Image (cartoon, rainbow, N blue to C red):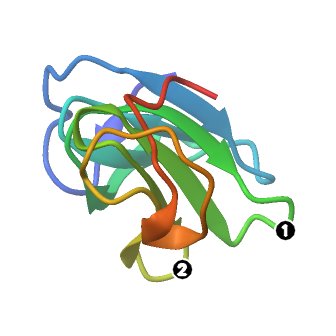
Amino acid sequence: LALEGEDGRPASQKPCAVASDRAGGWYVTTTDSLLHVSAAGRIRTVATCEDCRGIALSPDGSALFLADTGNHKIRRVEVATGAVSAFAGSSTQGGSDGVGGAAGVAHPAPF
């Protein structure tokens, strides 16, 4: 499968995590991006991210959850729009129960 980038030639970035979609494609986190690789091998940038080491797709396929290790957060990315929001964590290392930014997250690891 030859890969062809919609956003230019695929960068020589280090892949960190992958998750499959429901159409035979893949989501890949790199050192600074969230990419989608279609079943046909087309690559597009979904969102920019920093130090995301884990990825999971929501059950309905509408959102991705990224383990933002360096920023102590779990981020939510809307698949349709690429909008990124904080799902849990406050950028401060922690380990406490809570909802959203009140949840203490310390270096989330791959899911």
Q: Which residue is mark 2?
A: 80
**Which mark's residue is nearer the viewer, 1 or 2?**
1
**Residue 100 visible in the snapshot:** yes
Q: Which residue is mark 1?
A: 60
Left/right placement of residue 99 relative to residue 33 reads right
Q: Classify mark 1: helix, strand or loop.
A: loop
Give percent across and percent down for residue 111.
64, 29
Identity of the residue drawn at 63% across and 67% down: 63
| Residue type at the position of mark 1 | Asp
Give percent across and percent down for residue 74.
47, 51
Q: Quote the CA–CA distance across marks 1 and 2.
A: 12 Å
Identity of the residue drawn at 69% across and 51% down: 57
| Residue type at the position of mark 2 | Ala
99 or 25, nearer to the observer: 99
Identity of the residue drawn at 72% across and 49% down: 21
Query: Is residue 82 placed above or below 34 in the rendered structure?
Result: below
Query: Is residue 31 placed above or below 26 in the rendered structure?
Result: above
Query: Is residue 33 placed above or below 90 in the rendered structure?
Result: above
17 or 75, nearer to the observer: 75
Left/right placement of residue 48 relative to residue 2 reads left
Left/right placement of residue 28 relative to residue 96 reads left
Q: Residue 105's mark?
A: none
Give percent across and percent down for residue 25.
64, 43
- Numbered marks: total: 2
Dot 2: few (<14), some (14–19), or many (≥20) neighbours within 10 Å?
few
**Residue 78 visible in the snapshot:** no
68 or 80, nearer to the observer: 68
Residue projecting furthest to the front: 96
Q: Earlier in the sequence, mark 1 or mark 2?
A: 1
Dot 1: few (<14), some (14–19), or many (≥20) neighbours within 10 Å?
few
Identity of the residue drawn at 34% across and 20% down: 15
Q: Classify mark 2: helix, strand or loop.
A: loop
